[in-house]
Image (cartoon, rainbow, N blue to C red):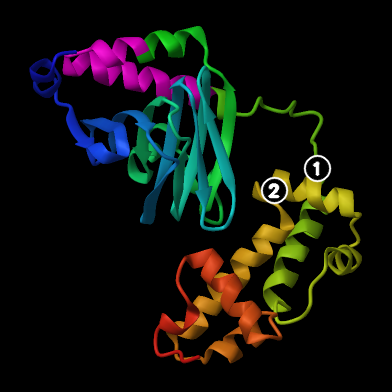
Amino acid sequence: MREQDREAAGWTRRQLDPGTGECRADQRQVDQGLLLVHSDYRPRLALVEQSKHDDAGGMVITIGLEGVSGYTTRDGEQLRFRAGHTTVTAFRHVSGERRFEANQRAAQLRVLVDEDALARYWPQGLASLLPHGGARQLAHAATTAASAQQARALLRATDPLAVHIGVLSVLAEQLRVLRPAPAPASIPRWSEAEMIKLERVHALMQEQMAQDLTLDYLCAQAGLSLFKLKQGWRYRYNDSPQRTLLALRMQRAKLLLENGCQVAQAGWQTGYRHPSNFSAAFSRYFGYVPKTVGRAGP
């Protein structure tokens, strides 16, 4: 598409310093909360680009057009994107680094859906996909013929209505993949008694988070096997017990700090016997050190 046609179609361009290499990203606002981005990077040297969404959440659908790139969150989770594959990621209050290899082209088409827009098409909301913040890869599979065709059409399209329809078609296809098949009503996967036991474990996490809680201890208290705990937790809370416990501890610690609690005391009340371990865990989770919260001191 020619430069004047691109601008007339509503694309705006962000280009890195030419010394970095040929690295640019065109973006187009499709609707409130819906953004289309076409990135095309070929850096001369390995490139690390900071990305911050500390005050935002939503979903990203990435259609790999050429090459590979990676994304590492501040918590160390790694996401990989490659040509011929579509990746769906949910994120909330997360920052990280995009990584590109030297002298390798990486081209992608991304659909960014913020939390409010996602709620229009996914009534369960972002929390059902990502209960405790961070970033999570929801799907990674070969790009379907339908999505590949839509991607080619979106890169050429100038009509706003055609772009809007194309973006919603890509989003609809991925949301259909994420919807689980309904379980037969006559064969419940988990009994009511097992659900009560899982909820008991969740309550123990909140009541006894100052203690050294192990999965074996929680299983014994609730009368569950380790297998049942892990599988049931994924079914009931869409997460792992360890990550749920970490999220509960971090949110409680943040509340304590905001109310004037000292760092060491906040750590002790949330299960950390050494302030340095607590500070490291808090910093990994939130992206800033605990002593900057409220009136808390080191």
Q: Which secondary structure dominates the residues rendered in magenta?
A: helix
Q: Quadrant of the N terminus?
A: top left
Q: Position of residue 80 (x, y in %)?
A: 56, 35
Query: Looking at this view, is 202 or 39 the one in front?
Result: 39
Q: Vertical placement of 104 versus 89: above or below? A: above
> Which of the two discs, 2 and 1, labels the residue nearer the N terminus?
1
Element on which disc 2 rests: helix
Element on which disc 1 rests: loop
Question: What residue type is disc 2 on?
Answer: Arg
Q: Position of residue 7 (x, y in %)?
A: 11, 24
Could you tell me how far apart the alpha carbons at marks 2 and 1 are, in whole angstroms? 9 Å
Q: From which residue to which does the magenta span run? A: 152-176
Q: Position of residue 164 (x, y in %)?
A: 26, 21
Does the CB distance between marks 2 and 1 fall below 8 Å? yes
Which disc, if any, is residue 190?
Answer: 1
Q: Residue at x 43, y 55 (%)?
A: 95
Is residue 159 magenta-colored?
Answer: yes
When asked about the image quadrant of residue 163, the answer is: top left
Query: Looking at this view, is 66 or 150 the one in front?
Result: 66
When asked about the image quadrant of residue 112, the answer is: top left
Q: Position of residue 210 (x, y in %)?
A: 71, 82
Q: Residue at x 79, y 35 (%)?
A: 188
Q: Residue at x 51, y 57 (%)?
A: 74
Q: List the residue tagged with mark 2.
A: 236
Q: Residues within 10 Å of mark 2 (few under 14, many from 20)?
A: few
Is residue 144 magenta-colored?
Answer: no
When asked about the image quadrant of residue 93, the answer is: bottom left
User: For this view, does 96 lie left or right of residue 6?
Assistant: right
User: For this view, does 198 lie left or right of residue 265?
Assistant: right
Q: Number of callouts in the render? A: 2
Mark nearest the camera among 2 and 1 is: 2
